Amino acid sequence: MKICCGTDIIEIERIKKSIEDENTGKAFIEKVYTLKEIEYCESKKRQKYQHYAARFAAKEAAFKAISGQLENKYEIGWKNIEITNNEQGRPQLKIIGVKLEDIEDMDLSISHCKEYAVANVTLLKK
């Protein structure tokens, strides 16, 4: 067995500027986030940018953790990774439309404060 991990940190203000850009904001959201993620983040009202940033960091961390499984880094895109919450509110990671061999389990931890969002993805490979 092998343990692989990925970590990412991002400035919340950077994501906020990308989303609020009148020329590219809509395209940015549609490129990076799934409908479930958008609905969740938008439901957070004043704190929505923290949640968008946390999901962005989680996707980046996931890319880093699974990169060794891919022959070509372009095999996976932003929307192939979805961050949702389980019944207890704990974030969970789902890979959509990409077959990754030998991954036994994955775990995700995210956190955010006023300025930054951080995420860590750990996976257990057979």
Image (cartoon, rainbow, N blue to C red):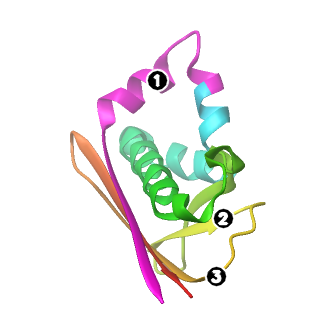
Disc number lying in front (2 or 3): 3
- Circle 1 packing at 10 Å, graded few (<14), some (14-19), many (20+), is some
Q: Nearer the viewer, mark 3 or mark 1?
A: 3
Disc nearer the start of the sequence (3/1): 1
Report the number of numbered marks. 3
Q: Could you tell me which quadrant the C terminus lies in?
A: bottom right
Q: In the rendered image of this protein, does residue 72 appear above or below residue 16?
A: below
Q: Which residues are magenta?
A: 1-27
Q: Pick whichever of labels 2 and 1 is earlier in the sequence.
A: 1
Q: Secondary structure at mark 3?
A: loop
Residue 110 in percent (x, y) is at: 35, 62
Give the label on residue 18, or none. 1
Q: Is residue 63 above or below residue 120?
A: above
Examine the structure image and report whether residue 36 is included in the region drawn in magenta: no
Is 81 positioned to the left or the right of 48 in the image? right
Q: Is residue 87 above or below residue 8?
A: below
* Mark 2, other Cα within 10 Å: few <14 / some 14–19 / many ≥20: some
Determine the CA span between mark 3 and mark 1: 36 Å
Magenta span has 12?
A: yes
Residue 22 screen position, x and y as percent? 55, 11
Q: Nearer the viewer, residue 11 or 45?
A: 11
Marks 2 and 1 close (CB-CB < 8 Å): no
Whichever of labels 2 and 3 marks the residue nearer the N terminus, that label is 2
Q: Name the mark on residue 95.
A: 2
Q: Position of residue 19 (x, y in %)?
A: 50, 26
The Cα atoms of the two marked residues, 2 and 1, are separated by 24 Å
Q: Which mark is residue 56?
A: none
Label 2 sits on what residue type?
A: Ile
- Left or right of 95, for residue 14: left
Disc 3 target residue: 102
Q: Does 68 sit left or right of 33 as displayed? A: left
